Each structure stands twice: as C-alpha cells, then as structure tokens.
Image: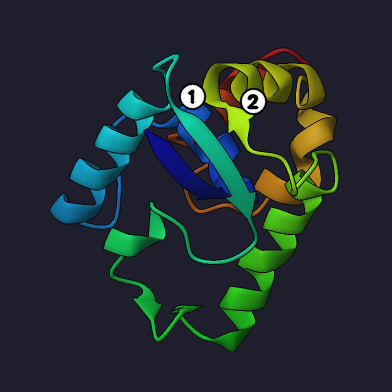
Amino acid sequence: MKLNLRGHHLLCLKGFQGYGYDEDFIKNMTLINSKRKLPQTTVSICDCPDDICSSCPNLIDGICENEIQNERIVSMDREVLKKLDITKEYGSIELFNEMDEIFATEESVSEICFNCKWSEKCLFYQKLSNNR
C-alpha cells in the first residue's frame, strides 16, 4: 500500500489524536494514520495536496483556503522536505523513525509548528514542548 504525503503532514500524523475539520477529514486522517504504521506501507513525499488533503474541506481547486494560507502551508512542507530525499519512496516505518531523529526538539519544529492551529491538541508538539 502506498501513501502520498506532504511534508508537514509527516509531523501532523505523529501528533494526531482524532481532531480535524469535519467528520470526513477525521475518518480519512485516522485511516491514513493507521496505514502509515503498517510495515508494508510505502510513502512518497511532496509539497502539494496529498492523501490527507483529499478529504479536507479547505482544499479548493488545489489551494489550501486561499493563496496566502496555501503559501504558508507549502513553506511548512518545504521546511520538512529539505531534511529528506524527495526523490525516494520510503518504507513508512523507516520514514517515521527518521522523522523521530530529525525532529526531536521543539527548536527543530519551531518554523513548522509554531503558529499551527492544532498545536494545543497535537501530541507530538506537546511532547516536544514539555521536553524543554
């Protein structure tokens, strides 16, 4: 099974605990979060709408909310992706283990997660914030 995930969603999945924009989004995010934990799952990474975005009510004509918000999201993606090989198809377990090593401190995600509307509910960000 193969997933296509944008850069910042690699971090979102690590902190997901069932919140989202609407019921369809939550159901899709829950399914993808389960699939990414399977050893047979592979992941391609990108800085554009992905398998998670496919059920997001804010995605309109390939743009997240509006041009300004979309550029902010793409910038978050690129911060993550500059630490990875975007030409590689990763084994999901391998990729998320690598994410744990790369993004292990609050400082390592400050440019990505700082102004995220989900940071108060994100287990990943809260863990890093508590480990100061």
Quarter-of-image position of residue 84: top right
The residue under label 2 is 95
Quarter-of-image position of residue 74: bottom right
Disc 2 residue type (three-letter): Leu
The residue positioned 78% from the left and 42% from the top of the image is 110
In-image side of 68 versus 119 (left or right): right
Quarter-of-image position of residue 53: bottom left
* Relative depth, front residue between 8 and 85: 85
Mark 2 nearby-residue class (10 Å; few <14, some 14–19, many ≥20): some
In the rendered image, residue 64, in percent from the top left (x then y), is placed at 48, 74
Q: Quadrant of the C terminus?
A: top right
In the rendered image, residue 12, in percent from the top left (x then y), is placed at 51, 39
The residue under label 1 is 123
The residue positioned 51% from the left and 27% from the top of the image is 14
Mark 2 or mark 1: name the one nearer the start of the chain.
Answer: 2
Q: Quadrant of the N terminus?
A: top left
Q: Which secondary structure lies at badge 1?
A: helix
In the image, which is nearer the foreground, mark 2 or mark 1?
A: 2
Relative to 63, is 123 above or below? above
Relative to 56, is 95 above or below? above
In the rendered image, residue 100, in percent from the top left (x then y), is placed at 69, 18
The residue positioned 59% from the left and 36% from the top of the image is 11
Q: Which secondary structure lies at badge 2?
A: helix
* Relative depth, front residue between 127 and 7: 7
Mark 1 nearby-residue class (10 Å; few <14, some 14–19, many ≥20): some
In-image side of 49 versus 73 (left or right): left
Disc 1 residue type (three-letter): Leu
